[in-house]
Image (cartoon, rainbow, N blue to C red):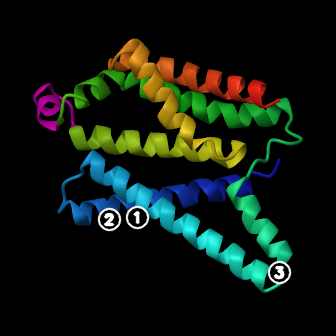
């Protein structure tokens, strides 16, 4: 398998997250608000999608159907065709390492859910934990999407469904979300076939 495109995708995701974090820091005057991060992320996502759609339109109108097809492929990027077990292992291993790190940090995440001041008073380095989680989750999302395509809605849906079932404690929420996300993919693929 060719991992160059996947690595470029990961670098691009980190670049977009850096832009979102910088924009959030400027708008929030140095304060990192969860709502601002989400809103700025959505603004950047809409802008990038708009640019891709505009480029596809220009290529189609200009008669360059090959370029329009390549731009459409960017949005539906999946390279799992022809993967061997070794390739799958290379894809899964970094994700498992990141999941293990997140599971180690789960108690800090639970404390962060009470708010910055409460987490700080309980000994959590709020900024270090927050930035570490943003980096780990960015890598996991970018790595998975670079090989499997856009499945971003599962990140939102599976965590919310799991939160309703097991509650807000990250000791149960994180493993439950991993299981729920995988289960949703399997169920959706089964229904689609």
**Whole-percent x, y for residue 133 in the image:** 39, 39
Query: In the displayed structure, does residue 8 sit left or right of residue 48?
Result: right
- Look at discs 2 and 3 and give the one toward the viewer: 3
Q: Are marks 2 and 1 in contact (CB under 8 Å)?
A: yes
Q: Does 124 lie within the magenta span?
A: yes
Q: Does 143 lie within the magenta span?
A: no
Q: Secondary structure at mark 2?
A: helix
Question: Does any portion of residue 115 appear in the rendered image?
Answer: yes
Point 63% across, 56% down: residue: 9
**Whole-percent x, y for residue 150 in the image:** 64, 46
Q: Is residue 65 above or below residue 103?
A: below
* Residue designated by label 2: 23
Task: Determine crowd level at label 2: few under 14, some 14-19, many 20+ residues with C-alpha closer than 10 A.
Answer: some
Tell me which label, 3 or 1, sits earlier in the chain: 1
**The one of 103 and 41 positioned closer to us in this rendering:** 41
Point out the stretch of residues depicted in magenta. 116-125
Task: Determine crowd level at label 3: few under 14, some 14-19, many 20+ residues with C-alpha closer than 10 A.
Answer: few
**Whole-percent x, y for residue 140 in the image:** 55, 40
Q: CA distance from mark 3 to mark 1?
A: 31 Å
**Whole-percent x, y for residue 143 in the image:** 61, 44
Tell me which label, 2 or 3, sits earlier in the chain: 2
In terms of image quadrants, where is residue 89? top right
Q: Which mark is residue 64?
A: 3
* Residue designated by label 1: 19
Q: CA distance from mark 2 to mark 3?
A: 35 Å
Point 49% across, 60% down: residue: 45
């Amino acid at each position: 398998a060719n991992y160059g495109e996947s690595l470029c995708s990961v670098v691009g995701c980190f670049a977009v997250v850096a832009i979102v974090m910088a924009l959030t820091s400027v708008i929030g005057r140095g304060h990192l608000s969860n709502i601002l991060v989400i809103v700025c992320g959505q603004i950047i996502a809409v802008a990038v999608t708009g640019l891709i759609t505009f480029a596809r339109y220009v290529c189609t109108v200009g008669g360059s159907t090959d370029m329009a097809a390549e731009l459409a492929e960017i949005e539906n990027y999946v390279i799992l065709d022809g993967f061997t077990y070794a390739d799958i292992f290379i894809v899964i291993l970094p994700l498992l390492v990141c999941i293990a790190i997140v599971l180690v940090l789960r108690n800090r995440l639970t404390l962060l859910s009470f708010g910055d001041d409460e987490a700080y008073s309980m000994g959590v380095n709020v900024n270090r934990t927050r930035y570490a989680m943003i980096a780990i989750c960015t890598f996991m999302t970018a790595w998975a999407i670079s090989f499997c395509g856009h499945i971003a809605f599962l990140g939102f849906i599976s965590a919310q469904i799991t939160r309703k079932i097991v509650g807000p404690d990250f000791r149960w929420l994180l493993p439950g979300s991993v299981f729920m996300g995988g289960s949703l993919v399997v169920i959706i693929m089964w229904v689609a076939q």
